[in-house]
Amino acid sequence: MVDPVSDPRPLAAVLVSAIAVVLIVASYRHPNVREGWSVLAALTKFGIVLSMLPGVLEGTVYEWSLAESTGLEFVAGIDFTLRADPLGMLFALLASFLWIFTSFYAAGYMRGLDEHAQTRFFAAFAASLSTAVGIAFAGNLLTIFVFYELLSLVTYPLVAHNEDDEARIAGRKYLTYTFFGGGVFLLAGTVLVYWLTGLVGEPTLEFEAGGMGALAEAAAVDPGIAQAAFFLLIAGFGVKAAVMPLHSWLADAMVAPTPVSGLLHAVAVVKSGAFGVARVILDVYGVETIQALPLQVPLVGEVGLNVPIAILAAFTLLAASIIALRKDHLKRRLAYSTTAQLSYIVLGLSLLNPLTIFGALFHIPAHAFGKLTLFFCAGAVHVETHTDYVSEMAGIGKRMPLVMSAFAIGAAGMAGMPLVAGFVSKFYMLTGAMQASYWPFALALIVSGVLNVAYLWPVVYTAFFESEDRHDAKPLLEFPPGGKRESYGVLEGVATDGGAPQPAGGGDDETEADESATDDEPTDEDYEYAVDQYPSDHTRGTDVHDDDDHTHDDGDDHHGHEDHHHGGAPPGGWERRSPFFGESTWLMLLPISVIATGAVVLGIVPDYAVFFEVADTVVESVTGEGVIQR
Amino acid sequence: MSEEIGSVLPILLVAAPILAATLPLIFGLRLERTGWSVALVTCAGTFLASLSLATTVFGDATHVLVIHELGGFARPVGIELVADEFSTLIVLLVTGVSLAVLAYTRVGGPRGNTFYSGYLLLVGGLLGLSLTGDVFNMFVFLEIVGLGTYALVASGDGPESAVAALKYLIVGTVGASLYLLGVGFLFMATGTLNMLDLQTQVEAAGYDNTLVVAGFAFIFVGFAIKVAQWPLHGWQPDAYQHAPDGVTPLVAALVSTVSAYALGRVLFTVFTVDFVTATPYASEIIVAVGATSVVAGSVLAVIQYDVKRMLAYSSVSQFGLIVAAYGIATETAFVGAVIHLLGHGLLKAGLFLAVGVVALGYGARTVGEYAGLAHERPYVAGGMAVLLIALVGIPPSVGFIGKWYIALGAVQAEAWVVSAVIFLSTMLTLAYVARLLERMYFTPAHPLSDPHDTAHDHAPAAATDGGTDAANGGTTGRVTVAMLAVVVCIAVLAVLLGFAGGLFFELLEPFTAEVFN
Amino acid sequence: MIGLEILASHYAYALMFVLLGVGLYMMIANENLVKKVIGVNLFQTAIFLFFVSVAYVEVDGEPGDSPVVPAEVAPGELFVASPLPHVIVLTAIVVGVALTAVALALIVRIYSEYGTLREDTLREVRADE
């Protein structure tokens, strides 16, 4: 174990955005200055984190401690320390890098929708990054607890941002779940660990690469409490990592603006949970201590302490993917995707094999890049067309070519296609699972890959290969579970010969939704009219404008009695836009392009992307040997 | 181990406010409004004196007793005033908060010379209660505090406050009388009243002595009433709610706090930890009362409409935590209890001051009326939010370090049920805190309109709290900068003290080392 | 007949607790505010009597252990009551008088506002507001 070098940079990295909060609030009258602070703080933060990278890769650990610099002890026996070690760097680097682009994107998004309370929004955003980096650099369990709680607190205003009933309920749920995780489980686990280590010597909470020595001794003295503390800690972090059955806050938090979803899913929040699980498994207990604490399960015999976690993660992996299949709301579908993807990380970590650990750690950035792309795309679509539902997105590739292409890349990454980031991490996890002969879990990984394709590919397909008036039914979304007995092709009248569809069915999803929402509404007329307008499914070029004028009233009526259908294709069909920054503002398109490119870079040349090396350094410091030859 | 220093500071601290309490009445014969000035000078003076006392007590790493023997009679016959590490911290809280509350009452009222006489009498009583080293003298100060509080609660404009004060008087007197009865039993068993002398005499009489145990039982029930533990808390919400806004911060922050301090003092100095552990069920009963109050107080707080009433029930719950920590009777839990005493006092002072400011400047009193507060009055809402969050125990804040030590102490004592209640208390507190925060920050003042249309990003006119326009049309008055400054200062202090967990532990170490051997 | 003996020698305590109970009952059950205050006074008086009787306590035939007068008197010769409880009671009486005064002042205020001294009527009046 190397002695840490005293350095104020970890503190500076945390404080940069905390100071930015003050500046943001102070300049609430000048939106440009305010967003300027956000970007400036993001860049500074990334610079500070980056400046520590070479040292950390060489094995230096930078540390700042409250006791050393001010003489104050946080609580008796426990110091407040911020320490930049390889694992912390992985998360800090990721969060601070992605924040730069998220702040551009957020500015574009919030202005695009003319949102209220933008100052509060940007202040809370900066604060959550501050706490995320605090979680990354926390040097002991208590420090990580402090930042974990603060993160829950400062992200609450973001979740409840819309100030309507739905947002308030989501906010309540978010607070309840996260504080149950942090304030109850995590605190209880922390106290138990502190007490346990006190049984064998000086009580401590300091992280040690490869597990706390004192805890290993104490676990031998009182294995029951050690196991309880382990599960409490994992449950505490598992809430934010959205491991089932603690996942339901994540899907509800979708009511928040899309940059917030990006923050929750990719940049900071759920990642902090996954990161916490990594800390607990790697630096608090350590692989050996966990293996030394088998559970006695009746009828089964001795089961490793990690196995229940792995089973839960594998279950979440599959169940969340299956749920995602039936979600029509795009962001909700992505939320369940996150639930599934986060379980990859937890699963990889809990298998305790160097390869799976490496894969899990690399999956943190891999998923972050991919999922951020997906959310940014969903947000861009929402801002530009107010379309939220997958069933309304037929042919949207014409309107937003660049965005939907980026979405395709992100989706491929989620599914673990080669050449995109997700493949690399899943490859290592799969190899590791097979190496350790965890066959059921290897199988789960493979099956979930198929499911990932099943729920994300339809979005890409409908965007590019279907058109607004002519697309297939979505049996998974529209039919009752188990499907219909009849051949729906004939029933719905989606004729294979390209002839005009029957009026009642319309072949149009909007009609379907319409009928369910307002049964007594005679929609036939409208739709005959609408259908008549598009006799064939090829896209029309220049006469779009005419049609818009023509059908304007009709469109308004249609919107009037549908509360969630703001979106969908305009009456004239999607307008064709150029893929070169013609579809939205550069504030949103630039981040999307960069992040999507990042996802590809991580997939094609992972060894040139720094995360690969950092993750390897972590595995090396934990297990003694690296995974990749350098 | 312990070092005894003679000093006039303790008697000065007690006598000065009580004597000064007569001045507003005397001046009042000729001058109209001198009360506030007299109170300010006296409170500032006592605050400085308490700082000086603190330097003496904490200047030495050993257990220091700053003692004043009244009338020069030595222990055990004479009455002593004793300042040690435990009581000095409480004295600092009392003098500090009583000074801070004056910033509100100057404009916010209640006004009048008689009010300030009562104010100073109460401060004097509280300081006496904190410093006395004699169990009967403690009863006298308990009653002086009671008298002062009843008078102040009744100084509200409406007749409601008189009813609340009478209810408080009857219940409070029963509490104090039960305490006196307990003291009587102790006196029967030992023949002495001095605390330090009692400590040895009680041990000599035997911890299983019926008289000692009976005395303990009466004293504990008496204090349970004074500290407002469930189910003996009935007087408290009425008193807090109907007291004038300028009085509630003082009463809520100090009166129950100092009573809880007195319980701790009697428990650990007179009866000692050995008694608590040796007596069957003593520890269990104390812990059970505390834990029940934690749960009951929080549940009752959640269903309240009036903000002051909600915070009053919150006090029941928070004091439950302290009493439970007393019952656990480990060093760590005790330090947690002391920190939580101070922290809760500070937080409640700030919160009730904020409630007063909101009532004065925004006309809001119920949880529902707090809608849109953050937008209309950002400063007071911000200060209140920080204080509420600290109350939940989210670090870094003084609320957290108290909870940390109490939880750690419970785990060290392997009291798993209590530990579970303590950990869950976060969620219970969050339930009512989040309800108010959601109202303040995420509910527009006019619920029918769309927030996207009306709530523009910080309208410039609403940036200051000093505005006189009232959105809800209630009675509004002038909110001064000093009031806001006090609320914000207390909020900042609550956060800063969150980093001083180790410091508190060190400060209390000489005392705890003595008590817990 | 030990029970009777104890009653004979400890009748003061028994009386005290009866008085305590009566006071408490009056406080809780009586609707009249003034009678409630009288209940408080009874309650306190019971405790005063208790203290006074404590002063005459005998331990193993020895006179009560008094801090002022040494206990080393010849057995049976000098029977001194401890003066300390009396002092305590004097102080407590003063405190009690002050409390009663404040309570009556509050009751006067309540009467002038609501025109009633009965708690049930008071509750009705306040509920109507």
Image: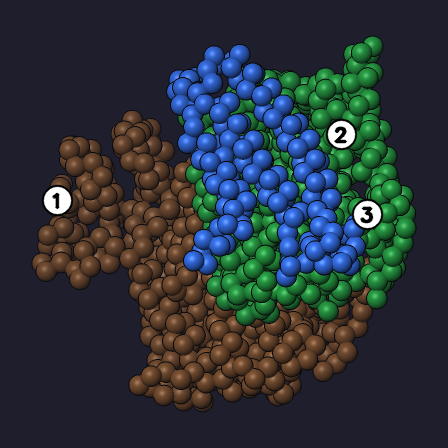
Q: Which residue is mark 3?
A: B78
Instruction: Say which quarter of the image contains residue C96.
Output: top right
Q: Tell me the element at label 3.
A: loop
x and y percentages locating residue A25 in the rendered image: 67, 39
Instruction: Say which quarter of the image contains residue A573.
Output: top left
Whether residue A551 is visible here, answered yes or no, is no
Q: Which chain is green?
A: B
Q: Which residue is mark 2?
A: B120
Q: Tell me the element at label 2.
A: helix
| Quarter of the C terminus of chain B within the rendering | bottom right
Q: Which residue is mark 1?
A: A502
Residue at 37% x, 49% y is A396
x and y percentages locating residue A214 in the rendered image: 64, 81
A39 vs A148: above or below: above
Apparent side of residue B490 relative to residue A421 in the rendered image (left or right): right
| Quarter of the N terminus of chain B within the rendering | bottom right
